[in-house]
Image (cartoon, grey):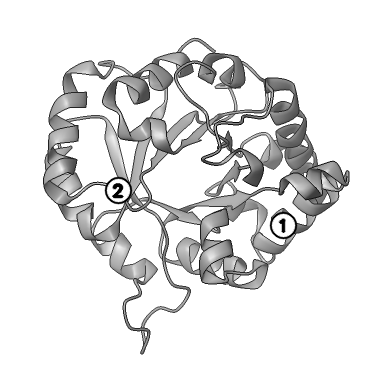
Amino acid sequence: MNRKYRKTIIAGNWKMNKTASETAAFADEIAPMLPKKPECEIVICLPALNIAAAQKAMRGTKIRVGAETMHEAASGAFTGEIAAGMLADMGVKYVIIGHSERRQYYNETDLSVNKKVRAALDAGLVPIVCVGESLEQRELGVTTELLDYQVSAALSGVTAKELRHVVIAYEPIWAIGTGKTATAEQAQEVCANIRALLRRKNDARTARAVSILYGGSMNAKNAAELLAQPDIDGGLIGGASLKPADFTKIIEAAAQG
């Protein structure tokens, strides 16, 4: 982490977990555990149905409520979808875009991710843009080339000024929900390469201002080592973010860097 130039962010991705009442119970449990002055921005991205309940339950804590996805259109005949403006009107700040599960199960593409990034920025949201490689792609040795393409495609048309309002999450697909984790060195290498790409496409000042998160099974045990890396500015946390004690330990680990 490098707090001198950029924000440290610990963001939970609840996926399709917890009801509204369970969300309230989570808030009651975690509230007394949280540091009074956390050294990071704390975000929980949760199912849209629970956003209002979460905002109410987490009022008075340092937790910001975010969304897990959104549609690229401002409005229209898209049954079941949610527009960026709807999220912004609810007071949402962060939204996850392009998570590997969205790409795998809902056919999201690099083009649709780019459209969503544009829509999020236009609505005043901060997109958390997910990129990452499969185990096969890593073994083929194309991680750097693939991530360069994914990041470039996602951020096409985004200005240097706008880029300061974008968060990038490196999530190796082979480490999501598998219990496997990239070593701190592997994660740092990829995050450093992403920052180098941002520097080449923009400038050094812009690149060093962008928060890059690691999101491959970060947990209470490995968080400190991962967050100690110079180009890892936080985490996008899956399963561990559902457990107040574990999530709090990761937040505390962010204060050690």
Q: Is residue 32 visible?
A: yes
Amino acid of disc 1: Gln
Who's the residue at 56% across and 41% down the image?
Answer: 176
Q: Residue furthest right?
A: 141
Residue picked out by circle 1: 150
- Residue plotted at (73% across, 38% down): 195
**Relative side of 102 to 137, left or right:** left
Q: Which kind of residue does numbered mark 2 sit on? A: Asn
Residue 131 got which mark?
A: none
Image position of 18 (left or right of 198): left
Q: Nearer the viewer, residue 88 or 22?
A: 22
55 vs 252, left or right, is left
Q: Quadrant of the N terminus?
A: top right
Mark 1: secondary structure:
helix
- Indicate whether 51 appears above or below 81: above
Q: Nearer the viewer, residue 164 or 1?
A: 1
Question: In front: 235, or 91?
Answer: 235
The residue pinned by badge 2 equals 17
* Quarter of the C terminus within the rendering: top right
Residue 6 horizontal/vertical position (percent): 56, 30
Per the image, label 2 sits on a secondary structure element best described as loop
Give the class, few, some or many, for how many residues have Cα within 10 Å of label 1's Cα (few <14, many ≥20): many
Is 107 or 145 nearer to us in this picture? 107
Which of the two discs, 2 and 1, labels the residue nearer the N terminus? 2
